[in-house]
Image (cartoon, grey):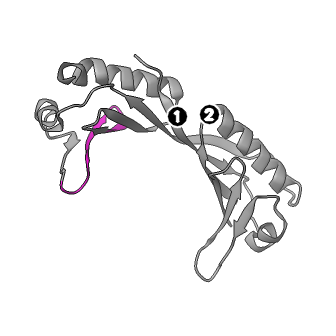
Amino acid sequence: MEEIEVASVVVSLDFDSKLDLGYLHQNIDARETEYSPDQNHWLKTWFEPEGTYVSFYQSGKAMIAGAGSVSEAEEIADRVTRSVQNIVDVGEPEYKIQNIVAKHSLNSPISLEELALSLGYENVEYEPEQFPALIYRKNGAVFLIFSSGELLCVGLTDLEKVRESIRKVIEDEIRQFL
């Protein structure tokens, strides 16, 4: 099986103390910030690398999206933590991976109609006029399978479980349709 490509890792940080979003907005070392308290209850920030988005909440929580790997997510979380700690008196935040989005190519087109019938309808959503992929839920993971043979896996927080889930769903449910 080809290696999977991590498309995005979503991480949460909990600083365990309230954050003054207006103060963070004025002082945080980010590529870009946006704060409109009359429209949103969070501070939007963008960090390097391009596409990394961090939202901060008054509760002391932050969500990081857009990292291309688990190690990159950890590096970004460290940078975000240092940026906050440089301007606000907070301790080390609790760090948690919330979601890993992974891509894999089946290297062959697939009949989603046949696959949907084979998988049964209790764990499958397939409405091609609404969305171009078959959605399959199994063991806590959600798979989006496209007729082109592209597969996305979301909903898991451990990279090895992502790899194993993709391998298993291909071997057990998809391989016969390739």
Specify the segment rendered in magenta. Answer: 129-144
Q: Label 1, secondary structure: give it.
A: strand
Q: Label 2, secondary structure: give it.
A: helix
Q: Residue at x 50, y 23 (%)?
A: 160
Of tags 1 and 2, which is closer to the observer? 1
Q: Residue at x 87, y 57 (%)?
A: 89
Q: Position of residue 142 (x, y in %)?
A: 35, 39
Residue that carries the numbered disc 2 in the rendered image: 70
Q: Is residue 34 left or right of residue 116?
A: right
Choose the circle earlier in sequence order: 1 or 2. 1
Amino acid type shown at disc 2: Val
Amino acid type shown at disc 1: Val
Image quarter of the N terminus: top left
Residue 140 visible (yes or no): no
Q: Residues within 10 Å of mark 2 (few under 14, many from 20)?
A: some
Residue 39, by quadrant, is: bottom right
Task: Determine if the magenta segment contains residue 64.
Answer: no
Q: Is residue 12 left or right of residue 131?
A: right
As drawn, 28 above or below 115: below
Magenta residues, dominant SS class: strand
As drawn, 156 above or below 107: below
Cα–Cα gap, marks 1 and 2? 8 Å
The circle on residue 129 is none
What count of labels does the image hold? 2
Image quarter of the C terminus: top left
Asked if labels 2 and 1 touch by Cβ distance under 8 angstroms, the answer is yes
As drawn, 122 above or below 107: below
Q: Position of residue 43 (x, y in %)?
A: 67, 67
Q: Looking at the picture, tell me which residue is in the foreground, 17 or 98.
A: 98
The circle on residue 6 is 1
